[in-house]
Amino acid sequence: MAAGLLVTLYEYSPFFYISLVFLCFVVTAAMVLGWFGFDVPVILRSSDETESLLPTPEKPMVQMTNPFILEMGPRPASVADGVSLRPCCLEPCVLSCFWGCEVSALQAALKAHQHHPLSAPQCLQEALQLRYHHCHSFHIGSEDREERRTQIPADQGIADFGPLPRERYPLVAVLTLAEPEARDTYNIVASLTVIHVPDDKYSLSARVLFQYLLTSQGNMFELKPLFMSADSGGVSEPPDSEQRTQPSEPNEACRVEPSPVAEEAWRGRDCVVCQNAAVNKVLLPCRHACVCDSCVSHFQHCPMCRAFVQESFTLTQGPAEQ
Ligand SMILES: [Zn+2]
Ligand SMILES: [Zn+2]
């Protein structure tokens, strides 16, 4: 029967050859497109397919509540006129401003913190062993957002902090919990901010150089900024503390709960890829907070800066939060 059919087809040779060529074409196309489960040649794969083969690992995070926020005020800062600082704390706090603090003294104090946590306001003062020019303290109520102005008294006659490289930080601002009971409630017991203040020798504008959170277990985490797209659609990467949201990921991943102020910065922003869901993933190491939970798995390169994505972490846990 089949042989008879082939013979008949062979007799109508043009039709037979056309169908043979067509069959070969279909089989080749099927192989190329991977319908038979053969591995697709790399050159034919779309970039999305490649990326979905290797999902971005999620960084394990621990959530902690940070009772402290310290930002620099909008007014210009200088050694002569002082610096305005805007604290916002969940509990009554003490803000201690150490002017002209020796770099080595601060390093020694942070090292001492590993054994004796610097939780009380006077602890750091003792640990620094008076190796600073001037200390200025303020009491801050809970949720008190009033701006505080600190400066070195003019009678000390300090106009600069020496030539570069410097042995002293212009200003170290430390927030500690005022009430001893509160120190047992929070894992984070102090926030330490090193601020550059322009002077005659080095006129770079005032800015936060780095910020650390100290824990009651004697650990120290650096706070780093997150970067988000601006409302206009362009990319803004403000170096100021406005968008210094909390997630710090030190040695083994600690996530600090986003503070109310910082949270406003990223809440309600739409994913730059689908423009549909809220931004909920931060890509590492570039720290761009730009994609939603579902889009993150499609990218091996950051959609904002094209940096290779090594890991990502979540801003809010669970679908319960909007
Ligand atoms: Zn998305
Ligand atoms: Zn990026």
Image (spheres, rainbow, N blue to C red):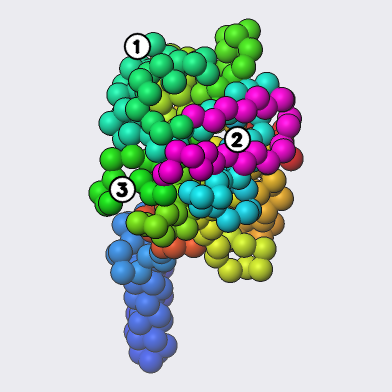
- Furthest residue to the bottom? 14
- Give 313 or 298, whichever is nearer the viewer: 313
Structural distance between the alpha carbons of marks 2 and 1: 25 Å
Q: Amino acid at mark 3?
A: Gly
> Residue under circle 3?
162
Q: Position of residue 153 (x, y in %)?
A: 52, 38
Q: Is residue 129 above or below residue 158?
A: above
Residue 290 as seen in the image, left or right of residue 53: right
Placement of the C terminus among the 4 image quadrants: top right
Residue 127 seen in the current view: yes
Q: Position of residue 298 (x, y in %)?
A: 49, 54
Q: Position of residue 165 (x, y in %)?
A: 25, 49
Residue 61 as seen in the image, left or right of residue 106: right
Q: Amino acid at mark 1?
A: His
Quarter-wise, where is residue 169 in the image? top left
- Give 196 or 315, whichever is nearer the viewer: 196
Label 3 Cα crowd, 10 Å radius (few <14 / some 14-19 / many 20+): some
User: Residue shown at 31%/48% (left/top)?
Assistant: 162
Q: Secondary structure at mark 3?
A: loop
Label 1 Cα crowd, 10 Å radius (few <14 / some 14-19 / many 20+): few
- Furthest residue to the front? 155
Q: Is residue 130 above or below residue 181?
A: below
Q: Label for residue 69?
A: 2
Q: Mark 2 and 3 residues: CB-CB less than 8 Å, in contact?
A: no
Q: Is mark 3 within 8 Å of ligand 2?
A: no
Q: Secondary structure at mark 2?
A: loop
> Residue under circle 1?
115
